[in-house]
Image (cartoon, rainbow, N blue to C red):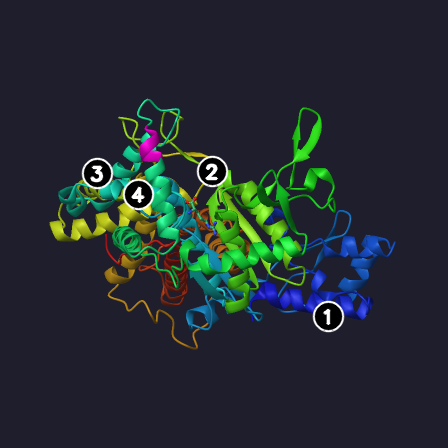
Amino acid sequence: MLPHKLIEQRLRQALKAVLPEADPSAVLLRPCPDPKFGDYQTNALMSLAKARKMNPRQLAAAVVGKLDVAGWCGPVEIAGAGFLNFRLETSALARTLQAAAQGEHLFFDKTGQPRAVVVDFSSPNAAKPMHVGHVRSTILGDCLARVLRLLGHKVITDNHLGDWGTQFGMLLAGWKTALDPARLQSDPLGEMERIYKLISARCDPAKPEFDPATLDRARAELVKLQAGDAANLSIWRDIIRLSQSQFDSIYGRLGVKFDYTLGESFYNPRLKAIVDELLQRGIATESRGAKAILSDGSLPPKEDPFLVHKEGEWLPNPFIVQKTDGAFNYATTDLATLAWRIETWHADEVIYVTDGRQQLHFQQLFAGFRRWHPEARTKLAHVWFGSILGEDGKPFKTRSGQTIRLSELLDEAEERAFKVVSEKSPELPETQRRQIARVVGIGAVKYADLLPNRQSDYVFSWDKLLALNGNTAPYLQYAYARIRSIFRKGGLDAAQPLEPNAQLELIAPEEIALAKRLLGFGPVLEAVAQEYRPNFLCNYLFELAGHFTAFYENCPVLKAQPAQRAARLVLCELTARVLKQGLEVLGLETLEQM
Ligand code: ARG
């Protein structure tokens, strides 16, 4: 058993002995924020004492009196207002590493209570090239899905493609009147984007190109499509197929897979019945010709997503589920989607990964859904993120002001990484340098998205993200390859660096510090899954690599005496495994040699 789980369990037993009625799951053990105070700590006893009007230090002392952590921790310290601090014994640390070296664990436990978690991410819109805004959703969502899966949850990934809606009226009008078949062949998304822009400008009364006849035509095409017109449906299918194949090539390069790509259109047949039900049950009402969910007054205005504060007044902020022209929309589709996911996949949790501009949409969706299905226990989370900025601090665009296409961004990443690799290792054959450049280039783009706190905007800088020093993908990928090279140099098989019954001794402070960092892997994975924050894992891996460097600079490995050498090789091997596993759930590949 992992030390922090064991201590937590013993702590719960001790609490039970002192306060038999208390809920043991309230006791959580966390890594100490400052190693000065110890390795783990809990503040749970303070709130338990407070709720019972007890003296927290007295409760702490009573619990410690019943606590048996002999062989795992030194004397438990009661600190401040009733914190408990735990310091692991080196022998317990060594035992844990030994078990890991034998392949019993990698410092994390699979959950005892697997949940069905749906991750809705990427979700680009058909007929439009994927741009850097979608990259963040794709990369963050993929990482969260990987972490949850690693922890033993049943993860279902669903790409909620924008494959239906008013834009298809314009696309159809453009397809029939302005399509260039040769361009469609060579650059399908580019051509579809071109006709879309052309027609949408003609449909926009604010633009000089405005042409009422085109607007009528686009409307008519949309009505025909929605009525099931065969010709329009067949063009619509072509548009989806062409878009999907472009998206697939990007997903292939990013190594991202989806269990489902149902798309918005999948839910069309269900929308009318849903709106009827919402109206009938009084959850949705007429609102200026449209049908919408409005505030039911059950929440304080500040927390009510159906109200908006304007000029000193709280005004209705409707969640429109049917427009004045009778059409259903993004909101209706999302209500249907959520109901379907819960019905079909028995989702315990649904996570949506989109940019921050959709916050209101998801607040209204979640609140509206709760009114429609008050019995649902599903946890709903909108995992939102900020924008990517150029080095000038403005939204990240090409020099001519165009949105940057993801495929071109990835090409450039590989090209730039190739230069870096060629400078560092000119002796390697070109095919190998290309292979390294792919892994490093794609990895660097992903890592740049994962490292910042997701809710802040970040500045995209090629030099920063490809730097070999600093908290970057190439730094971590090299750190991994460097450890592998130690084993190659020693002519050793990495898988079995320790004789099964050899004693592992940790003596040097750098060895102990590194070992303790390794034990932090499980708690950090759990924190990522809990708070949907991959940046915790990025920072952890970066620190781990730093501890490894300090260890390697101070503790010779291959030249050490046999017992010490074996112990140090275990540290090397386990660091490599954690780095590789950590990078893998971030969605980054590693290479044995760079
Ligand atoms: N297609 C949408 C967009 O590009 C994102 C969809 C997110 N998922 C959802 N269920 N609404 O903005």
Q: Amino acid at mark 1?
A: Gln
State the extent of the magenta-drawn residues as a range. Answer: 211-215
Pointer 3: what residue?
178
Return the disc, 2 or 4, that comes first in the chain's sequence: 4
Q: Amino acid at mark 3?
A: Ala
Pointer 1: what residue?
13
Judged by depth in the image, the label closer to the viewer, 3 or 2, is 3
Q: Residues within 10 Å of mark 3 (few under 14, many from 20)?
A: some
Return the disc, 1 or 2, that comes first in the chain's sequence: 1
Q: Residue at x 54, y 42 (%)?
A: 359
Q: Amino acid at mark 4?
A: Leu
Contact? badges 3 and 2 (CB < 8 Å): no
Judged by depth in the image, the label closer to the viewer, 1 or 2, is 2
Return the disc, 3 or 2, that comes first in the chain's sequence: 3
Contact? badges 3 and 1 (CB < 8 Å): no
Contact? badges 1 and 4 (CB < 8 Å): no
